[in-house]
Every structure is written in structure tokens, then in C-alpha cells.
Image (cartoon, grey):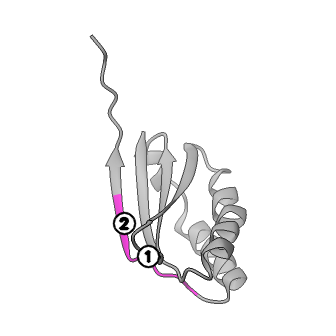
């Protein structure tokens, strides 16, 4: 499994609407692609503006196979729903390893 980590800055008074629209638009769209395993939203209790999105993918190849044009269309729909753009302020990719118990 591969984890896609995306960090955004969202004003506290916009956060709940952002999370709702993200679920309706981004999560719904990504769920239609092979390899999508799920998504979580992390809220930083020490920084009310920091929002982390964790997206779980079965493989990096499936994640990277999403056409750029599709991602751009989804982003345009999200930006229109929000009334403005929220640039990614940090990102990362992580591999999940499971350890065998002895």
C-alpha cells in the first residue's frame, strides 16, 4: 500500500465546508479509480489552519495512472464549489510495511 499525503492551509471558518466539498468531489471521484483504498482528513490540534489529507492506494502504479486531465477537471470542479483555489503547501509519499509477529 502507498500513502499520498497532502497538506493544505484552510481558514478555520472554512474548514468544515472544505472537508464536506472535498468528500463530495475529490473522494467521490478518486473512489472510481482502481487502487483507491480510502481517505482520511487529519486536523492539526496545534494549528487550526493545517489540514492533512491521507489517501491510501493499493499501488503507486494505480495512483499514478489517473490521467492528469481527469485530475485537472476534478480540481476545477472543487475550486468552483469552494469559490477559490487551495494550493498544496506540502506533500509526501509513503510506503506501508507490515511486520510479521513472531
- Label 1: state its secondary structure: loop
* Callout 1–callout 2 Cβ contact below 8 Å: yes
- Label 2: state its secondary structure: strand
| Image spot of residue 5 (x, y percent) | 41, 59
The residue at 62%/50% (across/down) is 33
Q: CA distance from mark 1 to mark 2?
A: 7 Å
The residue at 48%/39% (across/down) is 58
69 is higher (above) or lower (below) than 94: below
Looking at the image, the residue that sits furthest to the front is 46
Q: Is residue 96 left or right of residue 77?
A: left
Residue that carries the numbered disc 1 in the rendered image: 88
Q: Label 2 crowding class (10 Å Cα cut-off): few <14, some 14-19, many 20+?
A: few
Label for residue 91? 2
Q: Is residue 75 left or right of residue 96?
A: right
Depth check: give the residue in front, 34 or 88.
88
The residue at 44%/42% (across/down) is 59
36 is higher (above) or lower (below) than 48: above
- Residue 90 magenta-highlighted: yes
Residue numbers of the magenta segment: 85-92
Residue 84 falls in image quadrant: bottom right
Q: Quadrant of the N terminus?
A: top left
Amino acid at each position: 500500500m502507498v500513502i499520498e499525503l497532502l497538506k493544505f492551509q484552510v481558514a478555520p471558518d472554512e474548514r468544515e465546508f472544505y472537508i464536506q466539498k472535498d468528500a463530495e468531489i475529490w473522494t467521490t471521484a478518486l473512489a472510481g479509480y482502481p487502487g483507491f483504498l480510502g481517505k482520511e482528513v487529519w486536523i492539526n490540534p496545534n494549528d487550526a489552519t493545517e489540514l492533512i489529507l491521507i489517501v491510501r492506494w493499493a499501488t503507486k502504479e494505480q495512483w499514478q495512472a489517473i490521467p492528469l486531465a481527469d485530475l485537472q477537471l476534478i480540481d476545477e470542479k472543487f475550486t468552483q464549489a469552494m469559490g477559490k483555489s487551495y494550493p498544496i503547501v506540502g506533500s509526501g509519499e509513503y510506503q506501508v510495511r507490515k511486520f510479521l509477529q513472531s
